[in-house]
Image (cartoon, grey):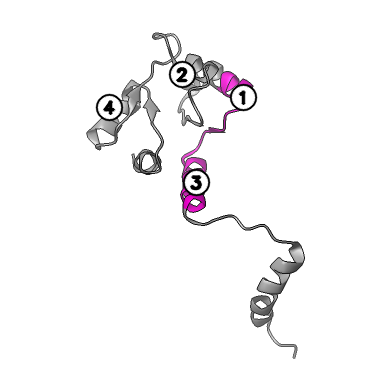
Amino acid sequence: SKLARQLVDLGFEVLATAGTREVLTRDGVPSELVAKVGEARPNGVDRLRNGEIAMVFNTTEGAQAIRDSRSLRRQTLMSEVPYFTTLAAASAVVTAIAARRTTPITVRSIQEYHEQTAPRAKTLVPPAS
């Protein structure tokens, strides 16, 4: 729920299947219900095919859930949409998106980077005996 809340705070709309949506609703995180493949249409695969989904977070557990998510994984790849399967990866990407919104990206050469970090690096090296 924390990651979903962060995504909403960053301006994303969250789509969730029934079980996940129930937890999000209980925790006060707004989300839109999306059907699992085989339940109804439009489902997650349809929404991907229609270009309505920008990222997929799918942390499945168990062999059956993994088999059930095959078509979702396949369509995500075909749609060239980022797909995250662990909470660690989801957390990292949400943190990166948040950082990118507050800190501009600066492009610099390796030499410029070295000039900035070399003074710090020298202080970390113990003196020769």
Please indicate whether residue 36 sits to the left or right of residue 119 in the image. left
Cα distance, mark 2 to mark 1? 13 Å
Q: Is residue 33 above or below residue 98?
A: above
Q: Identify the mark at residue 97; answer none if there is no mark.
A: 3
**Mark nearer the viewer, 2 or 3:** 3
User: What residue appears at the point 46 percent right and 40 percent down from the top-left corner?
Assistant: 87
Q: Earlier in the sequence, mark 2 or mark 1?
A: 2
Q: Is residue 82 magenta?
A: yes
Range shown magenta: 73-101
Could you tell whether 110 is left or right of 124 in the image? right
Q: CA distance from mark 2 to mark 3?
A: 23 Å
Residue 129 in percent (x, y) is at: 75, 91
Instruction: Name the amino acid, label 3.
Output: Ile
Residue where numbered disc 1 is placed? 77
Which residue is at a point 48% across and 40% down the rendered structure image? 90
Q: Which residue is mark 4?
A: 22
Question: Mark 1 touching mark 4, by CB under 8 A?
Answer: no
Badge 3, how many Cα within 10 Å: few under 14, some, many 20+? some
Residue 64 lies, in percent from the top left, at 47, 18
Looking at the rendered structure, the number of numbered marks drawn on it comes to 4
The residue at which mark 2 appears reads as 44
Q: Quick one: SS at disc 4? A: helix
Query: What amino acid is found at the position of numbered circle 1 in the picture?
Result: Leu
Decide: few, some or many residues near mark 4? Use Cα within 10 Å; few <14, some 14-19, many ≥20: some
Q: Position of residue 70 (x, y in %)?
A: 55, 18
* The quadrant where residue 118 appears: bottom right
